[in-house]
Image (cartoon, coloured by chain):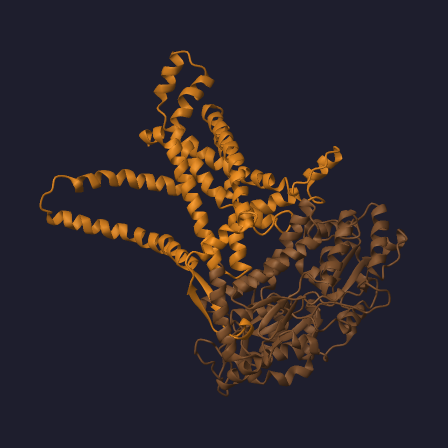
Chain colours: A brown, B orange
Amino acid sequence: MSNRSVHRRTVLGGAAAVAAGWALTGCGDSGDGGGGNGDGTAPREREKGQKIGLTFWSWVPGIDKPVDLWNRKNPDVQVTVEKVSAVNGQQYAKMHAAIKAGNPPDLGQIEFPVVPSFLLDNGLLDLAPLGAARYKDKFFGWQWQQSVFGKSVYAIPQASGPMGLFLRQDLFDKWDVPIPRTWDEYETAARAVRKKGAWIETFAPTNGNRFAGLAWQAGAKWYGTHGDTWTVHIDDEPTRRVADYWESLVRQKLVKTIPDRQNAWYKDLQTGAIPAWVGASWGDALLVGNAPGTQGKWRAAPLPQWKAGEQAHANWGGSTTAVFAKARYPKDALDFAVWLNTDPESIGLLIDGGYGFPSAKKGYATTDLDVDKDFFGGQAYSKVFADAGAHVDTSWRWGPGVDTLYQRLGDAFTDALADGSSFRSVLTKVQGQTLADLKGKGLKVASGG
Amino acid sequence: MSRVTLDRRAGATSRPARRNGRGPRRPASRTEARNARTAAVFVLPFFALFGLCFLAPIGYALHQSLFITERTGPLGLGGRQREVFAGLANYAQALSDDRFLTGFGRVLLFGAVQIPLMIVLATALALLLESASARGVPFFRSAFFLPYGVPGVIASILWGFLYVPGISPLVKIAGDLGWDVDFLARGTVLWSIANIVTWQFTGYNMLVLIAQLKAVPGELYEAARIDGAGAWQIARHIKIPLIRPALVLTGVFSIIGTLQLFAEPMVLRPLASSIDSGFTPNLHAYSEAFVGNNQHAAAAEAVLLALVACVLSFGFLRLTGGRAKGRG
């Protein structure tokens, strides 16, 4: 074990000396005129009038509609959508396997947090040499930055998921519980709801995604870089605060601990056994689809704050359209990715499908996003998420191996719930494991602090 | 099931042929050479498939398990990566992983409880159906066997609905009776899975045992009955000893199946907060390969799993083999 890491470190040290930072990578890539495929197969350029086909792996509901529109408008570049399953990250397993096997599609739908994992595989094409930078201003800056590393641009942002609090207004009114604006008030509300025989919501131990969002809100920064070294700060003050908070709710039995977004949870939403959900903007579609009987009773409220009057917000999910390293016609793939996520008609169709919050700055009105207004009793609920999106701490960065991190968190929280160990110990454990995981992947890492 | 019978038949027919070939050496006649060639043509597809579908993957897994991926380039992103020989490092890592080892302990405990239970149940059902003379026997035989026709994933989804509180009628009825059950709690979920497996495979094992029971010559029973043996004594002293080889066979299958436990925990995992990513060794290897994207570590774990399965099943055969072999 130790032998191995020492060996790796020497190799990495040498490489770092040669490459010395990001600037060089950018230059090197533009030098070979169109993105490094890594294996020497040069991507082709489409000749004028030549008809080509691109494949696109996605799971976004309703994605075929904007793609059909593109195909009608661009007879020469026909895009074929292949639907992939998004259950338990199966789509990424499939993509990684395809990269390893050497036959990935041209384009793929990839969420923000896992972009670095694909870079680790050399799976994505650097779009900077193709002139991607000129599209930067079309998108919200921080979302654009999520897939920018150094001077390289690895994906075109599609949508984000600003977080908020969904709640059953009718039940909160009936039980005379005010809508919580701070986490303290949230705990008070949880106590009041529990007295009425319900649980305010569930702390799903295996949902690392949401936990990351909550830590993000509290001011944590899990990943960072320092020179050519990754830094990991999962066990930091803000995250501990979030862990302590939820541990206290769990130990007081004020929240359930069932997994979210599965049958028992949907049933609880339908019956009012769980009248709230700290979720993200795309959660409206989940509520509408799985608790249709509660139409008109839901509202969206801003995420509770740690300090009254603050405006700290976070993001859960969000995805991009990325071009794979083996794409045969990178320029056309890039054109399609940009069109898909900026064209007003395309955005309109994506919103109808319920894909989240657009990353593009223009091309839609906030009211377009209130597709399920009736369900939320006529509330213009997107405003809540638009405000949240405007106050997301945009310095948050993702690192490689986030899927493994989520799994580690899930396992450790599961253990903690079973054996009563503290949530803080979960953070300590996962911090250590993540450092080891990244080292095991041949990366230079350091503990942040 | 079908594979076993096929193997047996193949063994039965090829044995005399082989004996002929090994007979006193004499110059091979032209017909014999032709026969040998014909035989080779018939046997070739089997060996080709055997090599392609069985030996090649094992060889590839062994090969993969000895390497690690090394990345260069700033921050490890966008740089070159290559496979580097790492010796047994992946094995050392797997063996020092608590979760992986706990998973092994878990399936061993599972097997120690579930396998005997299932085989006793299957034997009881087989004996009952074999001795019953009513017209309903074929119906019951099919009914008991039916769950085997349901794929493990579907069975788990099906049972999942019966386990999840809020949806399950079982949990509701128990609740109404004042009995607070949680099929998916940390301590019970393993046995909830054992229930699914038992439900699925008891009928299958029963059928294997019935097949062997059918082969027992009727005169033995007749003789026993004349000697004054009752139904229980016949079962105890004649039937069970005579179906011993089938019992050993189902035992070995069950041991291997237990170690491979995967579909059930995989399907129940999103429903239960109590199943972690390393609940069984197979699930751990899956997570390593498809979440951690570390195929080398997964390959090492798969090889270890195969080794343990090998040791346990051959150990079991040896343990029970002495007498059973004679009857083979």
> How many badges with numbers are in the image?
0
Q: Taking A217 as reference, is A377 left or right?
A: right
- Is A46 or A189 nearer to us in this picture? A189
Q: At 64% from the left edge and 40% from the top edge, which residue is drawn? A: B187
Q: Is residue A26 visible?
A: yes
Point out the image quarter for the C terminus of chain B: top left
Q: Is residue A297 visible?
A: no
Q: Taking B106 as reference, is A66 left or right?
A: right
- Examine the rendered structure and indicate whether residue A107 appears above or below residue A407: below
Point out the image quarter for the N terminus of chain B: top left
Q: Taking A449 as reference, is B190 left or right?
A: left
Q: Position of residue B156 (x, y in %)?
A: 58, 45
Rendering quarter of residue A139: bottom right
- Is A280 or B157 nearer to us in this picture? A280
Q: At 80% from the left edge and 71% from the top edge, which residue is drawn? A: A387
- Is B307 or A144 nearer to us in this picture? B307
Q: Position of residue A337 (x, y in %)?
A: 60, 77
- Is A111 or A271 nearer to us in this picture? A111
Q: Position of residue B78 (x, y in %)?
A: 52, 74
- Examine the rendered structure and indicate whether residue A62 appears above or below residue B312: below
Rendering quarter of residue A398: bottom right
Q: At 80% from the left edge and 52% from the top edge, which residue is drawn? A: A200
* Residue that protrudes farthest toward the bottom in the picture: A48
Rendering quarter of residue A291: bottom right
Q: Position of residue B261 (x, y in %)?
A: 52, 45
* Residue that protrudes farthest toward the left in the picture: B27
